[in-house]
Image (cartoon, rainbow, N blue to C red):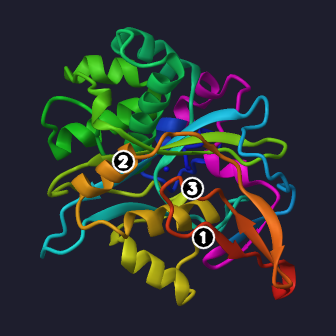
Amino acid sequence: MLLSITRARLQKTNKFGALINHNRAIQRSGVKRADSLAAFAGMDYSPGILTVANCMTTQPAPPSGPTPAATLVVFRRAPNGGPPELLMLERSQAMRFVPGAAVFPGGRVDPSDHELAALVAGGSLAADEAAARIAAIRETLEEAGLVTGVRQAVTGEEAAAARVKLLEIGRLGPVLEQFGWTPELDRLVPLARWCPDFARAFDTRFYLTDLGTGAVELAADTTENTRLFWITAAAALEAARRDEMRVIFPTLRNLERIAQHDDFAAAAADAAAYPITPIVPWEEERDGVLHRVIPEGIGYPVTSGPTVRPGGDK
């Protein structure tokens, strides 16, 4: 979905920098934020292909103690018709993990997400599921200035002001209260749950949501992310194939899955057709080539791909 606004890295050149620097002592409190892409620490990647050096399990069960995270795949109708477009972010080349990779917005589930989920979910969802959906909504607002998962219509001016408020206080609940927005968590459709089996892994839940026309103004934070863009799943896959865009292994597989469908409704129906179980990739040799593999029968049209080691060795 992951990325997050890591306040310790926001610079004064960022248009939000002065605000965040002013509140740094309050926001940090010695606790660092982490995005779900950190789940893939230890991975080597080339454009379009990624491998996990430490993930050798063949058991489709999550490791103990992973850090919960969430990401949101935002759909909009293409301006000129055709397949839906997806919101993606390009990570800064200065980032430690997968610099320059194109990803969906998302990040770590914070304690405040659990607190808000307990207030708004009303027992309709499991506590961890509700908190993950709150996190996906919060992270999308932080990273893209886009308000999702609320009942009310939101103007561009309101979204911009809400983003500033969220960056200032770091919690979604007061933002919703200030603007009179009611969260509707069922607007987020569960797609998958990825959980690599190695140290510092993140248990990342992927969701789909439909924006509609997408007639909104978006701005990258210019620190962790250098660019926001709308692109069809097929176009993203083609860009990755031509080495014009870097995508990590879970993103690549999710793009392939979404590219099968002509609209959001079809993608959502596909997501609902498969149970959400943790996906734990593993490595195995096939015809003398090492592949990363995920289980069959969970909705993905492609379940393996060759790994690429440093220096290009396969």
Which one is closest to the eye, mark 1 or mark 2? 2
Q: In this view, does 72 lie to the left or right of 67?
A: left
The image's mark for residue 100 is: 1
Q: Which of marks 1 and 2 is nearer the N terminus?
A: 1
The amino acid on which the numbered mark 2 sits, given as a three-letter code, is: Leu
Marks 2/3: CA–CA distance: 23 Å
Residue at the far bottom in the pictured view: 242
The amino acid on which the numbered mark 3 sits, given as a three-letter code, is: Glu
Classify 108 as above or below 37.
Answer: above
Q: Does the magenta stretch include residue 25?
A: yes
User: Where is residue 285 shown, x and y percent of the image?
Assistant: 84, 74
Q: Mark 3 points at which residue?
A: 224
User: Where is residue 20 shown, x and y percent of the image?
Assistant: 51, 37
Give the class, few, some or many, for how many residues have Cα within 10 Å of label 2's Cα (few <14, many ≥20): many
Marks 3/1: CA–CA distance: 10 Å
Q: Is residue 100 left or right of residue 67?
A: left
Q: Earlier in the sequence, mark 3 or mark 1?
A: 1
Q: Which of marks 2 and 3 is nearer the N terminus?
A: 2
State if disc 1 and disc 3 touch (CB < 8 Å). Answer: no
